[in-house]
Amino acid sequence: MPYLYHTDDDRKEMLDAIGVRSEDELFERIPGKYRIEKPLPIGEGKSEYETLQYFEALAGRNRPAGGMISFLGGGIYDHIVPSVVRHLSGRSEFYTAYTPYQPEVSQGTLQVIFEYQTAISRLTGLPVANASMYDGATALAESALMAAKIAKRGTLLCAETINPRYRDVLETYATGQDLDFKPIPHTERGDIDADALRKLLTGNVAAVVLQTPNYFGVIECPWEYRRMIRDAGALLVVVIDPISLSLLKSPGDYDADIAVGEGQSLGNEMNYGGPLLGFMACKNEYVRNLPGRLVSETTDVDGKRAYVLTLQTREQHIRREKATSNICTNQGLVALRAAIYLSVLGEAGFHELGRICHDKALRLARMISGCKGYGVRFGGPFFREFVVRCPAAADTVVEKASAEGVLAGIPLERYFGSGFRDDLLVAVTEKRTDGDFEKLCSILKAV
Amino acid sequence: MSFENVRFTKEHEWVRFEQGSDIVTMGITDFASGELGDVVYIEFPRVGQEVKAAEPMGTIEAVKTVADLFAPVSGVVEEANTALNDEPSMVGESPFEKGWFVKIKLSNRSELDKLMKKSEYDKLVGKD
Amino acid sequence: MPKTIFERSRRGRRGYRFAGEPAPSPAGIPSAYLRETRPKLPEVSEPEVVRHFIALSILNHHVDKDLYPLGSCTMKYNPKVNEDVASMRGFAALHPEQTDDDAQGALEVIHTLEKKLCAITGMSAFSLSPAAGAHGELLGMLIARKYFADRNGGRRKVLVPDSAHGTNPASAHLVGFENHPIPSGKNGEVDFDVLNRSLDGDTAVLMLTVPNTLGIFESRIGEIVELAHRRGALCYLDGANLNALLGRARPGDMGFDIMHVNLHKTFSTPHGGGGPGAGPVGVAEVLTPFLPGPRVRRDGDRFFFDRENPSSVGAIHSFYGNFGIYLRALVYITRHGAEGLRKVSGAANLNANYLANALADVYPIPHGTRCMHEFVASGEPFKKHGVRTLDIAKRLLDFGFHAPTVYFPLIVPEALMIEPTETESKETLDRFVAIMKQIAREAEEEPELLTTAPHNTPVRRLDEVTANRHPVLTATDQG
């Protein structure tokens, strides 16, 4: 059997040592009516080579966006992953290591998490970041629960322009929690309607939750209504895109209380939607309400600098039902990839990436606006993603493009209903070239 | 120090009372802090919060454990020694004086009579 | 000790560069929207990044290095072919918003894995959405809640044995249930009489781990499940210990209504230093409508997402769960087949019993040496020398082993929960036994060696008190 050691001799020696005749005897405590004697109906095992062939065939039946001209976004982006990220995260020492509960033999993992926490903190401008959540959606859900607990109130105002898939998860997590949600509408520019927000800010609002850039790619300006939110005694929770933080004002700049988001763009493959990387950062005063693991710097008995999991009393293995969350396993290896990615891009590289993505997105938007019948739907400033109003159903555009090997974008009707039938969400990363743009435009013109 | 006007609960809290005042001071005993280990953080009840005898009103955290902080008597929280969170080592160093947790305005003075005197408490923790 | 990547930085150093001319400053965004200072990220060259992370990596214990006898973690070998498959471009470069036509291979992976997990566990349907075991428990609790809500009137109680993992009560609480711990009896199994008295018309779920965290199979499991069902409650299985039962017994056959599987335990996906994992949830037939959508269906050769899921409890993940992780689990199942999985549980149980038998005369095993894939020993006898289980654990690190799980389950004092898994040789086990016995002797003869252990690790015992009182959670600014 593939990975076992025991020869017949080994087995016999061990069985003799414990006074048992066969391995099967060890299962005798299982009541007879449940004990299985026949093989499970899952087929025979394959050799390693046969296994590879089988999965190569399956992989071959996919047409991955990463190998095509793709303008798909919506929270998951086709960014370049530098080779070092794959090689370093593929080291056994990292990926076959356990959770760092014995810090003396886990300093590698712990220091990586510490550096990751630091990087997220610097990107978001908020002092405390945790070691990761499952994805942006669950990070948002947990941050909403956290805000409600801190504010001791039950209403959450959520922008309509938050990623609809995140909103679904948020609603699921609110089950059994005595919370209610009120949507904040958006303007024709694509950003939050601040007047509507003002009217919604009553004394029972725990938090205002918005996303920037929002699902339409439009950048919000939370500083304009920050004071209003604070005066109402509510928290500000923002869902942010990490790449956008290369250029845009950070949550710390506008005094957000909690920032969450999806870190997939930071050196991780798209992987058909998982594993992903939820990040979470907050102000110092909320650290004890934060879910997820936290690593602190400390010293050992010889005075050496070292790292250790801290504030574990928030977590399930100690606090059990009173824990801030039930999270245990998180997304450690993906956070490692993010740490490596941000290190190898560095300050200058990360800034450059933001500029490139933005410049390319602007160029494409301009070219599309020059195609007859097409235009950018929302007037607000955007980053890396924008909504195209098409002269026909966006579904049709996507189908025609697909036939030519181009993934034109996400038809917004999928999430926002028939009022968005002709709207297409287009994302542009550094991978796209002018040639790609020309190809897309020629397809658009032919629709 | 004299423990004449101090009483103890079986959850290892102490309460100090004065004649002519209905405000008492409470904390945890040296035995309790010995069991807990180094205290790292205390979650205090709010000033003005109503508390009931033998019910949890907060938590005490050590590195790897959390223990409930029980109210030794019923009443209203008058003051909380939140400065302890800047120096939690005080709980172990001076459990009966600098390490006090909460002052409570008694609602029922007779509750004090139901609590243990020092000699009884010492027996409970095997210190006699 | 190594510098942080921030401390290694030098102004102007660059790692990765993008193609083409430097991009212009951002146009079309008002300056009020732009940040004034760049986030202070490292400034290092690529070779330096490599040296930095390699230097960190070698400070870690890891499965590819040596044994992790951690109870209920199943630290088995992570096959390399899993990694090769997971990195195939056809899988890794797939965007989740692509059409079903573009993702036929991926959809087939999902469909096939769900079917195989059903066959292995005896459940009727699986959802691969949960990204971890605790996430699976959350889903399980949501399903239970909806099940009862739909039947007029919610039930509020969840019964959890006192030997259960902390995520169990935490998950129940997250969904608004009340936790009621059930004590274990002297034999380590659930106290049936207490259970009988506690299981009433307000009990929604009985959560069990089988075998339990003591490595003991609940011998009255049939009666227990039947009791719960008679009183209208659901039975949830925490599948953390499934490695003990592969190919030998199926939770579905025992009558469990909901369960989760930890793919990063039983099915060899790597631990990653704390994830990503995956915690698929299996349910009985009556609960299948509650699973999150979309569900993968098959029509001849074609697979597609069925997006009509009106009774679903809702989404718990942005997309379809940790695809890249459960893909690895399917590789593992494909490699092993039915016979292979049976051999896995056989060897896992043999290794644990072999260890228990060898250690019992030195480390008492309160519930006996006949166990399944793990057992719990006690460090209690060493307390008289001033040595605690924590010290034994730390001393083990000096010999190149990771410590077992300590102080869990709570019902054994000074607990040492030991699970060797099946991918360990007799020599490794013998070496472990020899070291454990040596440590026992040291406890008597040189206890200070233990109370100040570890001695040979990259760092020694840490000041956790200061880390908790005054946490430092980010690096200070680079020079």
Image (cartoon, rainbow, N blue to C red):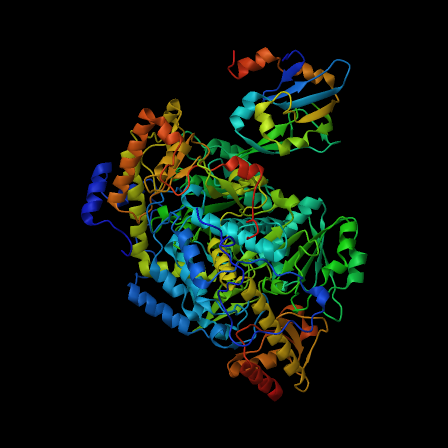
Q: Position of residue C351 (x, y in %)?
A: 29, 43
Q: How many marks?
A: 0
The answer to which image quadrant residue A188 occupies is: bottom right
The answer to which image quadrant residue A373 occupies is: bottom right
Q: Is residue A67 left or right of residue C39?
A: left
The answer to which image quadrant residue A313 occupies is: top right
Q: Residue at x 26, y 40 (%)?
A: C431
Q: Is residue A410 above or below residue A177?
A: below
In this view of the protein, which residue sits in the foreground, C97 or C112? C97
Q: Residue at x 76, y 68 (%)?
A: A187
Q: Position of residue A378 (x, y in %)?
A: 71, 73
Q: Is residue C341 above or below residue A447?
A: above
Q: Residue at x 46, y 72 (%)?
A: C104
Q: Residue at x 48, y 53 (%)?
A: A332
In this view of the protein, which residue sits in the foreground, C467 or A157? C467
Q: Position of residue A195 (x, y in %)?
A: 81, 62
In this view of the protein, which residue sits in the foreground, C300 or C8? C8
Outermost residue, left side: A9
Does the image show residue C395?
Answer: yes
Q: Position of residue A13 (x, y in %)?
A: 20, 42
In this view of the protein, which residue sits in the foreground, C57 or C387? C57
Does the image show residue C113?
Answer: no
Q: Is residue B39 above or below residue B125?
A: below
Outermost residue, bottom side: A446
